Image (cartoon, rainbow, N blue to C red):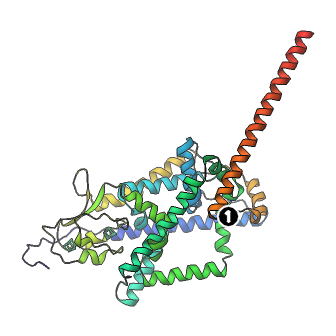
Amino acid sequence: MNSKKKIIRNLEKPVQKYRFLIQSCFAALCIWIGYDFYRFAHFLESNGTADYFRRPPGVDGFLPISSLMSTYYFISTGIIHPAHPAGMFIFLAIVFVSIVFAKSFCSWLCPVGFISELVGDFGEKIFKRKLKLPKWIDIPLRSLKYLLLGFFVYAIFVLMNLVAVKAFLDSPYNQVADLKMYYFFVDISKTALIVIGSLFVLSILIRNFWCRFLCPYGALLGVFSFLSPNKIKRNPVSCIDCGLCAKACPSSIKVDKVITVLSDECSTCLSCIEACPVEDTLDLKSVFTKKKVSKKFVAIGVVSIFMAVTGFAMITGHWQNNITKDEYLVHYKLMDTYGHPTGTTAVKEFDQKAAAKELQNEKSIDKRDANAEQDINKSIRHKRNN
Ligand code: SF4
Ligand code: SF4
């Protein structure tokens, strides 16, 4: 510590309790959605004899692949696919939040991030310190989430053409993807339970194990975060090199060694700013105005962007999907027969089949048009002859 510097104490009020409150509210919202979905599934299980309970559209937020494909389809065609429209708007809301406030979704809203944080706190209480992996293993493990993201991006944007994307979005599998996910957890297999249990234990040992190493959603938001104009900045003149910021960082970023935090792992949790004992030394600043962005503004901004985008979808009638109660009852009975392509070869085959089907449809439309034209000509000739 450089003791010669005059220290003006950082007396700014912390916002971590508000962050915790927002995370808790969002987690409660997810539990509520889960309960509503359970009631909807109960209706289907009763073969329509129980009271009808409408499917909660918010469940679409747990279908990231379908949402990514819907967004791709929307950007390419301007059409909002009706199977899981809420998923696309939730996905867009999260992307917008990341473009403005970096990966803040992870530390302010994401329920998995919230659980990871609580489990990490529990781990630190047990071990009395943060356990960190050595660099040589941490860096390759961190790239795993990018490999997963790369696979999805390659499969959707490279292997599949727009016809195949539409075929997938229209498919019965996509229509009941939420139900499939629900029964995956309700009838959880031994293997899945072991994997989830292992992730839980690993998250106690190493903070944010899932988020840091495996979450492809987080990887995508990390990429978008580079576009964010708001960055954590350290003032090296007033900094006393105490290292408290780096110690507080849940993402193990060496905040005390850089002027600007330019890391895909930074989740704008603001813990480093609050740990800094010196006034105006560590702040979130806009790269455009060079001015400090208040911590409260981050809290309000993250929630407002999310609510504005999802609220827009609700107001404009793009929240509920177009699948009727009777269609769901039929799907429920056939659900076990629905599958999806797994692996690049299966995706390629799916793409080829979709293209062939589209060609066949076009040909039958042409044939139908030709027949209709022939019929019209025939009736004209008939009228003339009479
Ligand atoms: S650098 Fe600061 S804001 Fe970013 S994750 Fe670390 S503690 Fe949170
Ligand atoms: S920026 Fe980090 S190292 Fe510098 S005074 Fe603040 S907490 Fe200490």
Above or below for 201 versus 230: below
The image quadrant in which ligand 2 is located: bottom left
Q: Residue furthest right?
A: 386
176 sits to left or right of 76: right
- Residue at 46% across / 57% down in the picture? 94
Residue 61 location in percent, x, y?
55, 60
Residue 206 seen in the current view? yes
Above or below for 343 versus 366: below
Query: Mark 1 falls on what kind of element?
Result: helix
Residue 286 location in percent, x, y?
26, 55
Q: Quadrant of residue 177?
A: bottom right
Q: Residue furthest bottom?
A: 127
Residue 273 or 75: which is nearer the viewer? Answer: 75
- Residue at 75% across / 54% down in the picture? 327
Residue 47 location in percent, x, y?
79, 63
Residue 113 seen in the current view? no
Residue 247 or 49: which is nearer the viewer? Answer: 247
Residue 182 location in percent, x, y?
65, 68
Residue 280 or 198: which is nearer the viewer? Answer: 198
Position of the C terminus, as image quadrant, is: top right
Residue 192 or 319: which is nearer the viewer? Answer: 192
271 sits to left or right of 201: left
Q: Which residue is mark 1?
A: 179
Q: Quadrant of residue 143?
A: bottom left
Q: Residue furthest left?
A: 4
Residue type for callout 1 = Leu
- Residue at 45% across / 83% down in the picture? 204
